Structures are given as C-alpha cells and as structure tokens.
Image: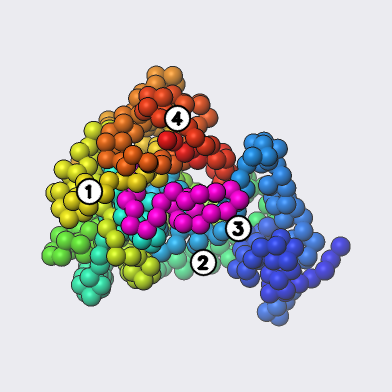
Amino acid sequence: MTELLTIKEASLWASNHLNKNVTTSNISYLIQYGKVKKYGNNGTTAVNKYDLINYYKSFNGQRETDWREKLGEDLNWALSFDNLKEKDTTKHIHRLHPYKGKFIPQLVEYFIDNHTDSFKKETYFKKRDIVLDPFSGSGTTMVQASELGMYAIGIDISAFNSLIANVKVGKVDFQDLNNELKRISNSLKEYISQNKNTQFETELLEELNTFNKKYFPSPEFKVKIRNKEIIEREYTPQKENEFSKIFEKLQEKYNLKLKQDKASNFLEKWYLEPVKNEIDFTFEQLKKVKNITTKKIITIILSRTIRSCRATTHADLATLKEPVTKTYYCRKHGKICKPLFSMLSWWERYSNDTVKRLYEFESLRTNTTQVCLQGDARNIEIISELNRKNPEFAKLVEKQKIKGIFSSPPYVGLIDYHEQHAYAYDLFGFKRNDELEIGPLYKGQGQEARNSYIEGIAHVLNNSKKYLQDDYDIFLIANDKYNIYPSIADKSGMKIVNQYKRVDTISFKKLISLN
C-alpha cells in the first residue's frame, strides 16, 4: 500500500500517531539513513505512510508494556522520562563536556524539588537547604540545586571531574572569556595558515565528495544494503582500497607527516601529528590567560575539543580500538570518511557552544553556592576543605548542616572514571587517583570486587553522616543487579525505606531512599 506524505505532513501524522512530538528533522533523519524510502522529485520529498507505520511498529508502542512485563507493575514509567528529547536531558551547561555515567537532570529535579504527586507523596528538600553529592561526577546535582535555590556540595576523587563540575556552577566574566577565546582562535588560525594540512584537507574533501556521490549515494546506498542488492562486506573493502590510492597520492603531494614518532602516552597514540601540534599550540595560548575562572572554562573547551579530534573511526568514538591514519569505510555514515587533520572547526564550534550554554544557565541560576571538593568521600573533612575554598559557605554548612544526599554512586566494574578522560590528564598534568576509585572497571564484577564496593560505599555514607541533619534523606541511583545495597545500608547504620523502579534506554535502575 502507498500513501505519500510530504515531510511536514509526515511530521504531523507521526506526532498524532505516536502521541508525541515528531519534528520534520526526525522524518528527514529516517530518510537520510535509509530507515524509510524516499519518494518524489522536482525538489519535493515524500515518504510512504505505511513505511512509517512499519518502522514505528518495530520499536515503539510496546515499549512500556514490555518493560512492565519484565520488571513488574510497580515500575514507575514517568521516571523513564520517555517523552524527553536529548536536547532536554543535555540542556544548557549539562553538555559542557562529555561524561560517561551521568544521570539526567530531570531525575534530580523530580526528587529534590517541592512538588508532590501520586507517586512522590512528600517533599524531601526545600529552598536554601544544602544537598550533598559525594559522587559528584560532572556536577548534575549541583547544577539542579542551583536552579532550585538550594546550596550544594559535590565530592569527587577525580581532579578533572571536579574541574568540570566547578566550571558549570562558577561565575563567569563573559567579556574576558569572549576576548580570550577570540585571541586564541585568531592565533590558532594564523598558526594553521602557515602549515599544509588545511590545503591537504580541502582537496581531500573535494575528492571524497566526488567519490562518495558516485559509489555511496545517500540514501540509496543504505537502502540497497538493506534490500541485499549490495553485499556490504564485499563491496566496501574494494571501494575503501580504491580511494586509499587517491589519499596516498594527496599525502605525497603535500609531503604531510601524519603519524607521530612515539606512542608512549594517549596524546601520542591517538592524535595525528598535525592535530597534536595544534593542541600543543593552543595549550600554550591557554597558559597566557590571567583570569583563573576564564582559564578553567577554556580548559574545558580545549578538553572537549581534543576529545572529538582523536584519530579513530566515527563508530569507535566511545570505545577506542586502533588509531586511524587514513581514510576508511564508515559503517555509521555509509560512505568513505576521514580522520581529522585539524582541530580548528571543533575548537570554534565548542567555544561558541560553551559561551551560549553558560549564558543560558546564567539566567536560571539562583543566588546560592555550590562547590565541588576534590577528594576521597570515604574520609574527606568537608568543613576543613570548604574553609579552604569558601569560608563563608563552610560557616553555613557547619551551622545549618546538610539536609541530605542525592547521588549516583559508580556501578560495580562498569567504568574507569579517570581513563575516560585520559587525554585531559595527559595534556593538563592532573594527578590521577585511579587506585582510589570505588568499583572501577579494571577490578571487574567478581565477589571480591563486590565486597570492596560494599565497604567503599558504606564508608562514604558513614563519613557523610557526620555532616547531615538528624532528619536526613538519602537518594542513591543504583543498578543493584547483585542486590548489595541492603548490605551497604546495614554497614552504614541505615535502612532502605523505598525502592523506586525506573527504566531508561540503558538499564534497569533502582532509585533507593535510605534513612
């Protein structure tokens, strides 16, 4: 059956069909990546309504029902925030820098704001309360506390995580920041203009555009693969090798050295030499910034930039496999792609994006204080450390005490929190404290690792209790598949009051209230 709809008509129809907002960009994405067939000509693009029905039936519709069958009827589907788009869950400063393992801000808001509903029957925090996050990560709890008019303290063993969190909640001198970014960008452009990699990349892009249009037209190529008109594993290596000859001739023409001589650290292994040279140049420019707050913000921008410039395939950005020093067939985009030979475009994009996000948050933040302390939450002296950072805030905490905790402890054997930002530790020289991480990936998920995890989290809670009010509340987001939180509660002299079931796109989680 065929019933053609324009992209706008398809957007309206899908929104009504799914009872959620589906934009024209969403429909265009389905066409671009070959999820549905493209119809029309003379500049008018159309899709078949029945192709859309089949596509949506394959994923949506039964999702909530399926999860309830798996997890039980006490699942709180509202806590999945299934209606939100990525731009909602990464709003304003929450996307200042990539970070594995963070929770979405809406989950924090739900439990620490002053609303009640049929599920959340009482409020746990109020304005001017102090919230503690002893596993601060990228600072989500602190940011939301600021929006809601609450004070907050974060603690993190990672120096880089602490930097991210403090940059998010710190005050900004926008004039100084814009001036310094302009100075560094102009200097970087001047530096790049004296090298060959820009000319090389421009000519390479022209060759890639011609080649991909001929052999990997979009979306026809992906449709042919799906319909088995093209056998991807046979076709793509041939074309990859064919283009590599064009690439090698260009490299020879510009006499461009791409691979670094050494690979003894992350920056030497995972960056092409032209990019590494630009990183070093920009870092030297960063050292000239006098305003400490501005310098910290630009440090985050530079870190975010170099993370996107690693010499890897687009499909391997999350889990690095092998450095890539030439063009390659990209399964993600269905065409021949290239590694990056310059960081300039990402530097400019992230500079503009960071300033924009900081401006957005400036209008939302309240006149309260949030500070992330770098240290071990198992034994950190919170008041003493606060006295070094912010004596006035330390006095308030000592007098008022902390109302409670909202945090997401690390999961057992899931992430190495220092290693995910290895490039930043290499470049900026932060001290690594891998051996002090609780539940790191490298220790695995065996019984010994679980026992160590139980002891670690219990020590954090026991240390935190010294600074809490008598009537405190603790919320921990935990993927407790090994059922270890009852032991943690027992060792902390607490009991589990509630377990709130929620589900997201990654895993089943329990949001546990301890008291």
**Comparing marks 4 and 3, which lies closer to the viewer?**
4
Q: Which residue occupies the foreground of this view, 206 or 158?
A: 158
> Majority secondary structure of the magenta segment?
loop
* Residue that carries the numbered disc 2 in the rendered image: 209
- Left or right: where 109 falls relative to 310: right
Q: Residues within 10 Å of mark 4 (few under 14, many from 20)?
A: some
Secondary element at tag 3: loop
Q: Is residue 512 above or below residue 109?
A: above
Q: Residue at x 23, y 75 (%)?
A: 175
Marks 2 and 3, how far apart at CA: 37 Å
Secondary element at tag 1: helix
Q: Earlier in the sequence, mark 3 or mark 1?
A: 3
* Residue that carries the numbered disc 3 in the rendered image: 83
In this figure, which colouring scheme has been used for the structure?
rainbow
Marks 3 and 1, how far apart at CA: 41 Å
Q: Residue at x 27, y 46 (%)?
A: 401
Range drawn in magenta: 110-135
What x and y, as percent, mark residue 372? 27, 49
- Left or right: where 128 falls relative to 315: left
Is the N terminus in the top left, top right, bottom left or bottom right quadrant?
bottom right
What x and y, as percent, mark residue 465? 31, 36
What x and y, as percent, mark residue 485? 46, 29
Q: Is residue 337 magenta?
A: no
Residue type, label 3 = Asn
Marks 1 and 4, how far apart at CA: 27 Å
* Residue that carries the numbered disc 1 in the rendered image: 399
Residue type, label 1 = Lys
Q: Earlier in the sequence, mark 2 or mark 1?
A: 2
Q: Is residue 193 above or below residue 331?
A: below
Q: Which mark is residue 495?
A: 4
Image marks 4 and 3: residues in contact by CB distance under 8 Å: no
- Left or right: where 434 falls relative to 54: left
